[in-house]
Image: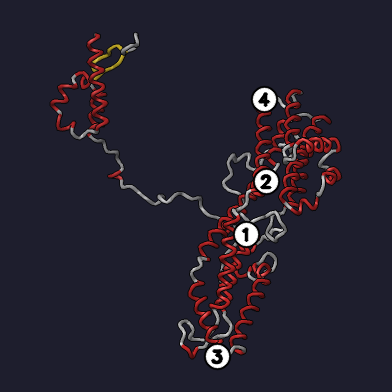
Amino acid sequence: MTVTYTAEVATSSGLGCFLKLLFRWKGSIYKLLWPNLVLYSTLYFSLSLYYRFVLNPIDREWFERLSIHCQTYGDLIPVSFVLGFYVSLVIKRWWDQYVSIPWPDNLALFVSALVHGQDERGRLMRRTVMRYVNLSLVLTLRMVSPRVKMRFPTMDHLVEAGLLQTNEMKIFEDLERKTNHPKYWMPLVWASGILTRARKENRITNDFSLKTLIDELNIFRTGCGKLLSYDWISIPLVYTQVVTLAVHFYFIATLMGNQYLDVSKGYAKHQIDLVVPFFTFLEFFFYMGWLKVAESLVNPFGEDDDDFEVMWLIDRNLQMSYVIVDEMHEEHPEMLRDAYWDDVVPSELPYTAATKQYQTEPPQGSTKNVEVPVHMADFVKDATQAEEGEDKETPVGDVPWPGAPGRMRRYSSASVHSGQSGREGGHRRSRTSVLSVLTRAFHREDSAKDLGRL
């Protein structure tokens, strides 16, 4: 029942692509809000007519005082803050629930690739594993989705549908007498047992492949567990109550506070009488519509227009699972030379006349047009690099490497006479970094020890 309009807003042009969506009924805010809007309008105009044509002058004055009082204190209710934060939380939770729905495709690919055997037993193992995986998802959805529960109200319906065998249902019934906790994980346990047996029969060739399959089963079980967790742990009830009360009491206050009063009495904010409170209705439409969005999305497994298509999901997963592990098992088209075999690397794929206008050059980065002048393109050496370069150019000989007989270490004249050169070149040493000074001091100490051994 998901309402999809992505194709209609693929390109934004003119006055905007969202305008064409305003007149749709299914999944629209009009469909959700019209009963509330009719009730609010009826109450508002009833009070307005009562004020204008029924009340006497004294009672009208009391009505006007009450209206100004409601207008003054009704604005103290932080509707936009409370409602906005609540709706953002609900939408995030709604999308997280969709992401948590486990899909059997990855596991089916692994089963097809790692569980070998074209005989009947190999085929039976692969199909049974995937049937158990889909059964686990259906058992989970039966616990969170009213539509799935109505489609499979009892375990006998699962047997009749072909997801569960009679002997397997007896195991469920026996376990039900021992514990009443959810048993959506039971088919996954059976699937892991089949994979373990396939490893013993060498249909799974190594332990790493078995671990990969078990890990995918655990990932699938985690997704099912998350769905149950979202169904169990709702948004705190106190928060939902606060938001609902804030919105409804605010608009109860506006029934009186936003009434048009007698212009001749000069009340503040009542310099005009339009009879129909256009902006009040807009405010009701936006705030109450916001609340209806939250009510619609707080449980996406129900029967609202934007709830998830779990019925289609069940059928799709079962079909794709069997296609991957049975129909396409160890099957692939004949390998032929591709169209660019002689070219090795194609320049680009062809464009149609309708898409030629979209052909562009590959992105080169924002510094593509930055050019460095030739006279500034050489690397600059500082004093430390120049001094190190001189050290490398004046070798004096080899000395034994400390603690490693037979290995020689080459020292330069600068390293051997570092003390003297340090005294003579004090003005250069002041420009070196701290790290350079420490490094050279370490080399001087190391050199002195090595020369002492000599």
Q: Looking at the image, is mark 3 or mark 4 nearer the viewer?
A: 3
Identified at 79% across, 32% down, the residue is: 125
Q: Looking at the image, is mark 4 or mark 1 nearer the viewer?
A: 4
Disc on res. 207: 4
Q: Looking at the image, is mark 1 or mark 3 nearer the viewer?
A: 3
- Relative horizontal placement of residue 348, taking residue 379 as reference (left or right): right
Name the residue type under label 3.
Pro
Disc on res. 57: 3
Name the residue type under label 1.
Ala
| Residue hosting label 2 | 228
x and y, in percent, of residue 239 in the image: 57, 57
Say which label, 4 or 2, has the lower sequence index.
4
Q: Is residue 320 above or below residue 410?
A: below
Res. 253 image quadrant: bottom right
Q: Is residue 19 above or below residue 82?
A: below
Res. 420 image quadrant: top left
Disc on res. 353: 1
Say which label, 1 or 2, has the lower sequence index.
2
Give the quadrant of the N terminus: bottom right
Say which label, 3 or 2, has the lower sequence index.
3
